Image (cartoon, rainbow, N blue to C red):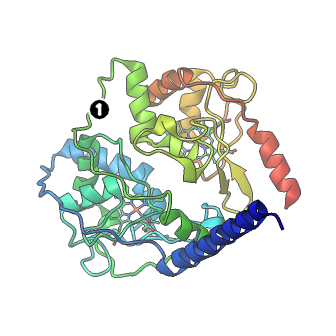
Amino acid sequence: MKKVVRVLLILIGFVAVALVGFVSFAAIRGVPTYDPPVIQDLKIEVTPARLARGAKIAQMHCIACHSDADNHLTGHQLSDLPSLFGTIYSMNITQDTTFGIGNWTEGELLYFLRTGLRKDGSFAGIMPKFATMADEDLKSVIAWLKSDAAPVQPVAKEAPASDFSLFSKLLANTVIKPLPYPEQAIVIPDSTDEVAFGRYVADGLGTCFACHSADFTKQNPQHPELSAGYYGGGNEMKTPDNKPIFTANLTFDDETGLGKKYTKQQFIQAVKACIRPDGSLIRQPMFPHLMTDYEVGAIYEYLKTVPKLKNDIAAKEKEALAQQ
Ligand code: HEC
Ligand code: HEC
């Protein structure tokens, strides 16, 4: 054997051993724990406006993932996630002090929602991080979590523990990491600048990009526009009856995106009520969004400015169904 070939084979051998070693390491280590973070104290003033805003934001995000059949936030299995991630449950976020988050301070909640880190340094890898939501909006959510709203009243019930797949553990040991706590204040853009405001509503408030991009594992929560396939859709999810479904292409590509499909008014109806221009229903996991017409209209104006991507979602779904 030539010397070069021998050296190459030895090198490949080393890489293979290292890879197997790393996979076993991730399998045993699971989702890693970090140093306990330093968390600033915070006192959130409760106002009726904050409670109303918090309820609305919770309806779009927290309730969808954390509610049980009785509409209390005790957690449930997230069955619309691809099974590749494992069997994932959300957790009890009612005010119960044993099973819920009754003992969490406002500062701990804000820190967690931004970064994914709990005060003990344990890391929530699956739960979305609200990296670009405005401080004011997150404070409203926290005020609501601490309020006397029915869904967050204490319920002493523990959600089953998640069974993370090897794939999830590998991700949590490589690409999915806690986010840094923002150094600067994050404010809601002036609503008279419709495009800038629409960008905030889409990326920061609605986190539409999280579903409507190419791949959950290639997202950039701090700079959503750098996510793979930003608003081009194609992220694979599951319908309630366990069929593959792909998120829609929301760029203004004429053939495969929203370009010719939706007027602004029809888009508002689609996002608020999940009804398409032809009267058909937009299926879950898309859900009706509690937003004002102005907010959804602004998303539409923003999406017009996003680089167009050609991505034929209907063809993708047909192909996936044929393979089943
Ligand atoms: C896509 C589903 C999803 C959404 C949306 C979501 N969560 Fe979660 N949440 C989870 C999962 C899953 C966990 C368990 C941790 C993990 O594995 O990531 C969790 C964990 C938590 C925890 C930690 C609880 C504990 O005892 O450790 C808190 C607090 C929390 N979520 C609050 C919220 C709030 C507030 C919102 C709304 C702003 C929200 N979540 C939106 C899925 C979600
Ligand atoms: C939990 C994931 C998820 C989130 C978050 C989400 N969507 Fe969707 N959306 C989907 C899926 C899946 C579909 C495809 C439904 C279907 O094919 O019936 C869809 C479809 C749509 C459609 C229909 C497109 C068409 O081609 O007819 C529009 C419009 C839309 N979403 C807009 C939005 C906007 C705007 C936001 C943020 C405010 C958003 N979505 C947030 C998952 C999501």
In the displayed structure, 26 sits above or below 132; it is below
Position of residue 270 measured from the top left corner of the image (x, y, whole percent): 59, 35
Q: Quarter of the image containing the N terminus?
A: bottom right
Q: Position of residue 125 (x, y in %)?
A: 45, 63
Visible in this render: residue 165?
A: no
The residue positioned 59% from the left and 72% from the top of the image is 18
In percent of the image, x 69 and y 25: which residue is there? 261
User: Toward the viewer: 299 or 164?
Assistant: 164
The front one of 302 and 216 is 216
- Left or right: residue 37 versus residue 164 is left
Placement of the C terminus among the 4 image quadrants: bottom right
- Which of 144/313 is in front? 313
Residue in view at x 44 percent, y 64 percent? 66
Residue drawn at x 56%, y 21% as measured from the top left: 304
Q: Is residue 171 left or right of residue 232?
A: left
Does 93 sit above or below residue 62? below
Give the residue number, with chain letter if any, for mark 1: 188
Callout count: 1
Using residue 133 as the reference point, say whether residue 82 is left or right of it: right
As drawn, which residue projects farthest toward the right?
Answer: 322
Is there any visible trace of residue 222 in the rendered image? Answer: yes
Q: Amino acid at mark 1?
A: Ile
- The image shows residue 281, relative to residue 156, as above or below, that is above
Mark 1 vs ligand 2: CB below 8 Å = no
Residue situated in front as seen by the camera: 218 or 1: 1
Q: Quadrant of ligand 1?
A: bottom left
- x, y percent for residue 248: 66, 39
Residue 167 appears in which quarter of the rendering? bottom right
- SS category of the residue bearing label 1: loop
The quadrant holding residue 97 is: bottom left
- Residue 42: x and y, percent? 13, 55
Please give left or right for residue 73 compared with residue 9 in the image.
left
